[in-house]
Image (tube, rainbow, N blue to C red):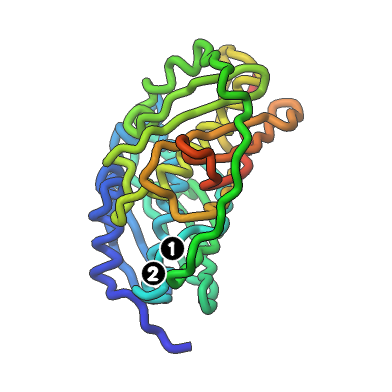
Amino acid sequence: MERCGIEIVDVTRWIEGSPFGAALGVEVVSLNDDEAHLRLPFRESNSNPGGALHGGVAASLCSIGAQALTRRNLGADSGPWHTCVIEVGYLAAAIEESVEARARLLRRGKELCFVEVEVSSERGRAVAHATSTVRGRFGAPEPEYAAVDPVPGPDQAEPGPMGGNLHRIPFIGARGIRAEHMQDGGARIVMPFNEANADGAGGNHEGAVLALLDTTGAMAAWAECGLGNYKASTPALQAQMVRVPPAQDLVAYGRCVQRDGEVFFSDVRVATRGDSRLVAQGTVVYRIVT
């Protein structure tokens, strides 16, 4: 199949020049038709307390790498682009160190690209692994997006002690993410639109949406478990971007649907705040060691 992709310099400009990419500090080491090599220097603003890289940042790197190869291969006329599905496994923590992401094109279709991404620490430790399927819409008209039912309902508001401290996590605070409700296995988490979360095209960056989805799944698990002096982490998430995220305030609804000992399974729906139309959906596997 003939390659007629976007110029490498333009893809690099999208990665490093988008407000969200610049806020993270993503750097392009190399990029060609088959591979993308990204680097992210350590920044406290990308971290959890203790200097560990936030899971939303690792997922963002995976999304950016997969989108870069899709744009490069399918071409400028194939946009806009969105990630039909991404599955991320978190293998280990990166603590106060830079990380690198290497994305590899597995297959290029007519409007879909299949990509594998590996994230490793500067010391060579495997941090995350992802597979992603990215779609070029080729200007196709948008469908009527499904309405999302609030879970919990819009009149319920009980952020609880943990929800009130979300903004203290550097990466989450920088996104403007806050909890409106966390109770009985349910969570309602909001992310107002702001420039630091924007893609180069002006809407919310997929990485910011993944961070919202990841956070909501974790908060639903905490709402099921209750607070305590516990250790917690996200072993895996799966997400589907059903559309290009718009430049609107977003709200995510999470529900812990199953607990199995220290492992929690949470379903998450992300919608536009104004009209409750679906933007993304997924499942977060969260682990709380009690």
Residue at the (74%, 28%) spot, across then down: 259
> Element under label 2?
helix
Classed neighbour count for the residue bearing mark 1: other residues with Cα under 10 Å, few (<14), some (14–19), many (≥20): many
- Specify the amino acid type for callout 1: Trp
Residue 221 seen by the camera? no
Which of the two labelled residues, at mark 2 and mark 1, occupies the earlier sequence position? 2
Determine which quarter of the picture holds residue 211. top left
- Specify the amino acid type for callout 2: Arg
Residue 124, image x and y in percent? Answer: 42, 51
Label annotation for residue 81: 1
Label annotation for residue 67: none
Residue at the (27%, 41%) spot, across then down: 195
The residue that mark 2 highlights is: 71
Residue 175, image x and y in percent? Answer: 35, 34
> Element under label 1?
strand
Residue at the (41%, 29%) spot, across then down: 177
Q: Is residue 214 above or below residue 25?
A: above
Task: Count every numbered label the image shows and give the total.
Answer: 2
| Label 2 close to label 1 by CB (< 8 Å) | yes
Determine which quarter of the picture holds residue 5. bottom left
